[in-house]
Amino acid sequence: VTPPADVLLVVRTVQWMSSMIAVSSLTPYRHCKQFMASNQDVLGDDKSSNLANLSKWQIALLLGVGVGVGTAYYLYRRSQSSKSSSQSQHAAIQPIVSDESVDEPDLTTMSAKDRAAAVKTKGNKYFKGGKFEQAIRCYTEAIELCPPAEKEIISVLYQNRAAANEQLKQYTNVVEDCNKALELNKLYTKAISRRSRAYEELKEYRKCLEDLTAQCILESFQNAATIMSADRVLKIVGKTEAKKKFAERKFFLPSKAFIQTYLESFANDGLQLASISDAPATVDTSAFEEDDYFLMARYNLAQRQYDDIIENCTQEIDKDFSPYRAEAYALRGTLKLLMTDGDSAMKDFDKVLEFDDASPRVKVNAIIKRASYKLQQEQTNEAMADFANALELDPENCDIYYHRGQAYFMVEQLSEAILDFQKSFELNEKFSQAFVHLGYARYKSGITQQSSSLVEKSAKTFEDALEKFPNSADAASLYAQILQDQQQLQKADELFDKAISIHPHFPSYYVHKGVLQVQLKQDVKAGMELIEKAIEIDEKCDFAYETLATLEVQRGNVEKGIEMFEKALSLARSENDLSHTLSLLIAAQTQIKVGRNLGVSPMMPF
């Protein structure tokens, strides 16, 4: 599969993420769709909907708790008194206070508790009149008057004072008052909600997320507004922390399977495939001169020996004269892109375009990869401009249409994506990836438009693909995932077997089949064995680690799950992938922490 966004998003596409398309557009949390199919009713969604309609946070919530497949709830060790239940119903979206205003009584004849209540009522009256500073003074006086044993009343007073501080945008004071309220009543949902808003204003997003998580738990995941807020803040946390981690990452080549998948997404490469596919049979390496660095790099590429290619290309570029300098820059840029060293790769691709005598196909290949990286950097207009420039150089190049089709798919322009995939296949009817992704684009379009005819047309495209390309593991695997989405589980299982038999050394097929065993047969052991097999095949497959982490957390093996998430993080191939995995990890860690604080007992494994 080819990357609409970048190498990482690319390969993640078909081989490791089922398809770049599926990864980025069908569902925000691509790997766990199968686990969550029966959980929509718990989250208040339409039961007929699929995971594509769940928010990122909803799915993260399901991942973060120790539950069985088809279950998503906590068992709470907390009081079910009417007062506690009443408190948990309050969303506290507006800064309200606890009581209606009443006429001021004579305080001299009252007990300390009654005097506190009367002063609180006076504060409520000031609050409703917009006199927030006077309200704060009243609540402060009431707190001082109220007997220490009346913890529930004092908790309400602190929360009311926090409400007044919130109106004055004194967010640090809001946090302090809510803290005091929660020290006295840790299940006080209104105080948790108010503190979460204050933390967000103070840009303390981790703490905000913890409070929103507590709300979700206490509201049994039934409050859509809370879930949406948690989803939004989780994205901020994940994206912010991912940016920092990605900047500190170490560059390394992915697995051979990953690299092979990426290279196969170019049918008219002019560098990696077309010009060197016969290299093993035609090249006698003993005939190489000592300084034939690029010829050796190209031979190593054909032999799938990637470790020395960047050094070979650098030596070729540094020669006083070389007829292969443009090609060396292009090949070195490709390997750097695969290593996630995008900035260095862009410099190499730019250098390729400076050579007037470079092959148009080599130039087009560099432009496509540059566009893919720009798309991954969310520079959509610049990426589309690059595709247009590539078409001016080589209008009959199927790779341009294929990768631009991926780009259109990424930005939800499905009609344009379908047209580009069709054009790509028309230009090269041996290019199976174009035909397979045409089928997937039709499926996505059918789901989006709720068109059964388009879904049927997609199925027909895949049936044709299996006939036209009987040795395409990609066609079998992606069609299996669509059937899985359509709950045709037995046929999906058979197609995953077919994909594995065609390409037994690709890890993603084992992961997808493993997930299906959980969904189809509730056989967690068999599913995990298949995922572990994927890791044996490719120890750099972050998809496998992430999926295994999800299963471990669901089984209640939280510490093991976190360990697997952290392994997946170390292998993430793009900032987007890193943000995605990091969000899962943060969601799990946050819910564990909050659950312990609230006295929540997660449901244990099946």
Image (cartoon, grey):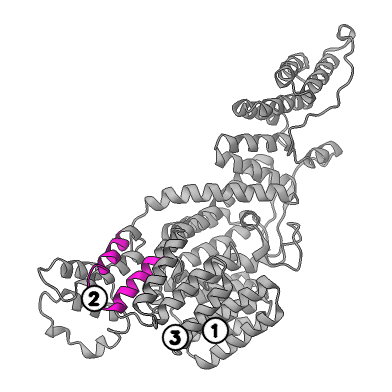
Q: Name the residue type under label 3.
A: Phe
Marks 1/2: CA–CA distance: 38 Å
Q: Nearer the viewer, mark 1 or mark 2?
A: 2
Q: Name the residue type under label 1.
A: Ala
Q: Quadrant of the C terminus?
A: bottom right
What x and y, as percent, mark residue 238?
52, 50
Q: Residue furthest top?
A: 108
Nearest to N terminus: mark 1 or mark 2: 2
Q: Secondary structure at mark 2?
A: loop
Question: Observer-nearest residue: 416 or 5?
Answer: 416
Q: Which residue is mark 3?
A: 431
Q: Which residue is mark 2?
A: 358
Q: Residue at x 37, y 71 (%)?
A: 389
Mark 3 Cα-neighbour bin, 10 Å: few <14, some 14–19, many ≥20: many
Q: Main secondary structure of the magenta part?
A: helix
Nearest to N terminus: mark 2 or mark 3: 2
Marks 3/1: CA–CA distance: 15 Å
Marks 2/3: CA–CA distance: 25 Å
Q: In the shown orientation, is residue 370 left or right of residue 605? A: left
Give me the disc on residue 476.
1
Q: Nearer the viewer, mark 2 or mark 3?
A: 2
Magenta-colored span: 344-372
